[in-house]
Image (cartoon, rainbow, N blue to C red):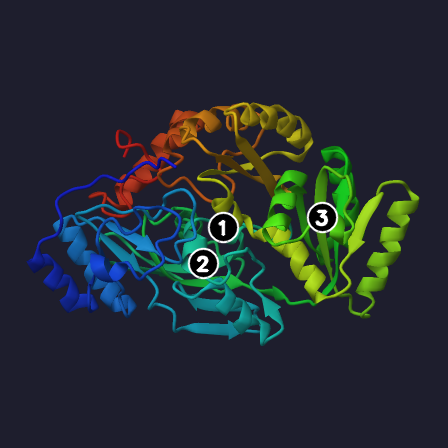
Amino acid sequence: MTQPQPTASAPLEEDVLSQIEAIAGPVMREDRLRDWDPGYHADNFAAGIAVSPRSVDELCILLALCHEQRIPVVTHGGRTGLVGGTASAPGGIVLSTRKLNTGIEIDPVGRVAIVDAGMTLEALQQAAAEHGLSPGIDLPSRGSATVGGLAATNAGGIEAFRFGTMRDRLLGCEFVRADGVLVSDLARVLKNNTGYGLTDLIAGSEGTLGIITRLAIRLEPLRQVAATALFAFPTIEDTLAVAQNLRDRFGDRLRAVEILWREYAETIAVQHGQSLEAVGIGEGAFLLLAETEETPDGDGQDRFMAHLEALFEQGLVSEAVLAQNSSQRDFFWILREDADVLFRVWPNIHSFDVSVPLANLGDYARAVEPKLKQLADQVGVYIFGHLADGNLHVMVGLNDDLPHEAMEAILYPGLTEMGGAFSAEHGIGLEKREAFASFNSPAKCQTMAAIKAALDPRNILNPGKIFLPTTA
């Protein structure tokens, strides 16, 4: 897959590296970086230099040096992004937050967590669970994605339809400006009308405005899973109708409403030595994965089964399988979450992440899917996503290396006009810079460029991301 590249310059000189080491400890060179997981972009470690500050103080001093000497800084969390947001180039440094992961404070009364940016989502989930709480966000890369990275990209995930994206989960944040100054806005309360919403601004900024060090995250009650079911339907509209029915019936105890195109689900099943027919899914073209949480009375599964019977009686459902044990539930979720196996199936995989208003979802899918399948003689189109909020993930597998823009030209036109978005969860990074310039209004792009110039006048923070080189 051809990927856009960050701007390169001359490698850093040894005296500069010595200064960096004196501030933040050993510098990881190219030979040692080979042992680190590079993530999804080939140039994540192209800088050949990585440093992991051991404290916020070290990070502040390091950024002040980089600001003074105009050294580009690309922040890395878990490197789970898919749009080149952590790609680096010679002449800069990779700044890993992996050592900023020792602090986590859970306030069970206020239902707030104060978390270091380098903490993984899974670690936060486990810490919150000890108090019967949850961060209200979940996604497949929970074991490696860091909370700082999730905030920087405004990640969404499985529960966004009921608890919002990462920006909605934040009460406050602490970050370091490009010049090394620490800005703390770690409020723990929902009502905080004390000036500009800096937390909202930093969330989703992809490391271009500041480096997140700590976060105040809202927590929700943790409930046990009551029932997990896999449905199959002939049309998207039938799938949407039952999804809405489940939302109306179970409210905030509906944990997940995920849609899987059959071609996607079958491919994942085969890669795991299974088949959809083996679990009871016959001919339906669209699968719905739904999961509910336990009720206070402990009869959540019985209530779900009773409602499922009613859906059959009403003719709204003709194919559905209720998970009978944890192994079957795990398999249902593997179908949804193990998209990485597609990288083994195709030499080239292009990944897209769009949001479509639910009223337009069927027409949109019917318009784009056949066009994508006509791009080459051999092409696999795999679609899945978060049905309740209209977020579709589209992965296109090819034997040839077609330009990414050929698929964007099919997927992106018309989205903005219908009220959707060409980037739902993964941000802009390098990959979507052209789309950012083309599908946003000039006024929006100019306003964002002005904010970037004000907070990072020397353009050292994740340079070349979001904006095309001519606009920032």
Identify the mark at residue 145; answer none if there is no mark: 2
Residue at image position (82%, 70%) is 297
Q: Residue furthest left?
A: 15
At label 3, counting other C-alpha atoms closer than 10 Å, the crowd grade (few under 14, some 14-19, many 20 or more) is: some
In 3D space, how far apart are the residues under numbered discs 3 and 1 (Cα atoms)? 30 Å
Q: Is residue 128 above or below residue 401?
A: below
Position of residue 438 relative to residue 199, above or below, is above
Looking at the picture, tell me which residue is in the foreground, 91 or 320: 320
| Residue found at x 25% / y 48% | 46
Secondary element type, mark 2: loop
User: Residue tagged by mark 3?
Assistant: 276
Label 2 packing within 10 angstroms: few (<14), some (14-19), many (20+): many
- Type of amino acid at the residue the image marks with label 2: Ala
Q: Amino acid at mark 1?
A: Ala
Q: Residue type at mark 3?
A: Leu
Residue picked out by circle 1 = 155
Could you say which quadrant of the image residue 17 lies in?
Answer: bottom left
